[in-house]
């Protein structure tokens, strides 16, 4: 009992740390794998559970890995998270572009299993489910708004146009790099550093039941924890339910009644719950099948950002399902294949379309599309399929080697670049390698490396009326330790 309560306390503490660490991810914003053994196989474990992190994919696996504790930490580095809006297309002497800073995140994980009897096992998995983080020193939206303002309204920009050249659309050519809407005397607030910080953690208490010698079922309660902040979004005050009412007299340039639920409100927290159920069965001495389905995790609202996310600040964790098989090619070599589908379109704040050029006109967006409304602007993400293949080779009693590859659909359509400057989750291909070293029968050390290849999403005409681009690649090192009771 003391051992159990101790690990429950540890799970709660590390869960909070995982959320604080801002877990970023790869398949959209979900993590590719959870723990070093899973990551080394590109997450292809629905039919081939590796350790007590199994409930992060298939709760049935918790009854097949023995009594153990697994703890690890991932060093995640999203490289070259950059965005560009080609303001030169409107006559400016530069393009507005920047790279997000803060390129290293630490994501802990923890799993524990214990047998109740010969058929029933309970356990708990804690993991960073995913997240989004960007920090741009240049406010891409605000600098672009300055150029668009000069182009569309004929406002001369500092420095003034040379003598003989009339102010007007051509004034955009004289907007210096780094110019803000404030340089035109517009009272726009919260337009300094631009970015968001979303982190999701899940605690999954799990029961696994061996219904037959070769078939196991499992169920997990998914307890979700989220933390979020946004800053630098002051240019979108006229897109909020509160701010839109004060924009008519300014032609949409700024709001006379800005919302206090849009941006720069520090960190807010949300909590929720869902379920995941799964099955693993040996259908042939050399072939095992697995399947798991997770409901949406229904989260409480981000009250401090109720006029940013749709449905008054709702940001649920999407539903998903995974099926797969493992083929025992030799006594020492397992080959696994997984297919996963993630339903981003089931969460309005993620899937609702972002703004178009028409929404930046003097009349502003339709009331039903205002930020915070049920149909309010979102990131425009689509459902995606994820395909994974992996090999797990037992070299001897001390060493295992793993490798994997994953491919997923692009969740971000080309016409949704503008808002996804905040969340450039563009990678589609991932390659992984890993190994396990066993210094004793009870102890194991695991290592994995993941590379997500750079992927771009480009648009010939963003909602600002100019071409745009977002891109990212990623690297991750994962180190974990296992102790078997």
Image (tube, rainbow, N blue to C red):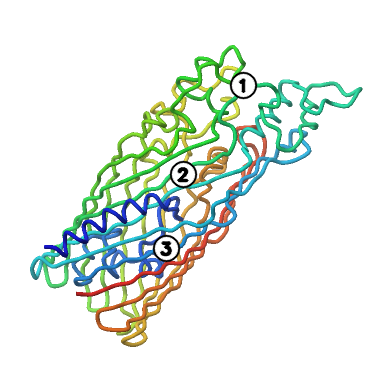
Left or right of 202? Residue 259 is right
Query: Pointer 1 and pointer 2: residues touching (CB < 8 Å)?
Result: no
Q: Which residue is mark 1?
A: 187
Visible residue check, residue 255: yes
Q: Residue at x 49, y 33 (%)?
A: 264
Residue at the far left in the pictured view: 117
Left or right of 80? Residue 371 is left
Q: Residue at x 16, y 62 (%)?
A: 4
Q: Residues within 10 Å of mark 2 (few under 14, many from 20)?
A: many
Q: Residues within 10 Å of mark 3 (few under 14, many from 20)?
A: many
Q: Is residue 470 above or below residue 205?
A: above
Residue at the far bottom in the pictured view: 396
* Residue 90 picture location, percent across and down: 74, 33
Which numbered dot is residue 74?
3
Residue at mark 1 to residue at mark 2: CA–CA distance: 26 Å
Residue at mark 2 to residue at mark 3: CA–CA distance: 18 Å
Q: Which residue is mark 2?
A: 197
Q: Residues within 10 Å of mark 1 (few under 14, many from 20)?
A: few
* Residue 57 picture location, percent across and down: 30, 59
Q: Is residue 299 above or below residue 294?
A: above
Q: Quadrant of residue 63?
A: bottom left
Left or right of 56? Residue 221 is left
Element marked by disc 2: strand
Return the residue nearer the eye: 289 or 417.
417
Q: Earlier in the sequence, mark 1 or mark 2?
A: 1
Return the residue nearer the eye: 2 or 98.
2
Element marked by disc 1: loop
* Residue 256 picture location, percent across and down: 54, 16
Which numbered dot is residue 54?
none
């Amino acid at each position: 009992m003391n051992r159990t309560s101790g690990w429950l306390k540890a799970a709660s503490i590390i869960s909070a740390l995982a959320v604080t660490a801002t877990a970023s991810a790869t398949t959209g914003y979900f993590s590719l794998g959870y723990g070093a053994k899973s990551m080394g196989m590109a997450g292809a474990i629905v039919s081939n559970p590796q350790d007590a992190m199994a409930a992060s994919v298939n709760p049935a696996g918790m009854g097949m890995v023995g009594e153990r504790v697994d703890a690890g930490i991932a060093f995640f580095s999203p490289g070259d998270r950059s965005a560009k809006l080609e303001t030169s297309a409107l006559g400016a002497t530069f393009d507005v572009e920047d790279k997000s800073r803060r390129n290293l995140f630490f994501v802990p994980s923890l799993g524990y299993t214990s047998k109740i009897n010969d058929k029933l096992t309970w356990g708990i998995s804690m993991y960073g489910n995913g997240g989004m983080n960007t920090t741009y020193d240049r406010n891409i939206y605000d600098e672009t708004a300055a150029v668009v303002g000069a182009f569309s309204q004929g406002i001369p920009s500092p420095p003034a146009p040379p003598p003989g050249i009339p102010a007007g659309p051509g004034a955009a050519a004289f907007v210096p790099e780094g110019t803000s809407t404030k340089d035109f005397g517009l009272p726009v607030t919260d337009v300094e550093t631009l970015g968001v910080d979303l982190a999701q953690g899940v605690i999954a208490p799990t029961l696994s039941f061996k219904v037959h010698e070769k078939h196991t079922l499992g169920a997990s309660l998914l307890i979700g924890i989220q933390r979020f902040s946004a800053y630098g979004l002051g240019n979108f005050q006229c897109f909020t339910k509160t701010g839109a009412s004060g924009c008519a007299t300014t032609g949409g340039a700024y709001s006379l009644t800005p919302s206090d639920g849009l941006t720069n409100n520090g960190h807010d927290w949300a909590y929720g719950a869902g379920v995941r159920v799964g099955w693993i069965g040996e259908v042939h001495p050399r072939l095992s099948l697995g399947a798991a389905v997770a409901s949406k995790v229904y989260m409480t609202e981000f009250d401090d950002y109720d006029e940013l996310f749709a449905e008054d600040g709702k940001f649920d964790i999407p539903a998903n399902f995974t099926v797969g098989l493992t083929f025992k090619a030799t006594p020492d070599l397992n080959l696994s294949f997984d297919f996963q589908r993630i339903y981003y379109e089931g969460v309005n704040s993620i899937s609702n379309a972002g703004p178009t050029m028409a929404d930046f006109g003097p009349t502003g967006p339709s009331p039903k599309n205002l930020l915070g409304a049920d149909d309010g602007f979102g990131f425009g993400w689509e459902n995606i399929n994820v395909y994974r293949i992996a090999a797990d080779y037992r070299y001897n009693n001390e060493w295992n080697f793993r490798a994997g590859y994953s491919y997923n659909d692009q969740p971000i359509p080309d016409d949704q670049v503008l808002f996804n400057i905040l969340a450039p989750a563009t990678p589609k291909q991932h390659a992984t390698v890993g190994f396990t070293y066993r210094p004793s029968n009870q102890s194991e050390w695991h290592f994995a490396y993941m590379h997500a290849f750079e992927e771009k999403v480009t648009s010939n005409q963003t909602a600002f009326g100019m071409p745009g681009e977002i891109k990212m690649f990623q690297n991750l090192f994962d180190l974990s330790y296992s102790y078997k009771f």
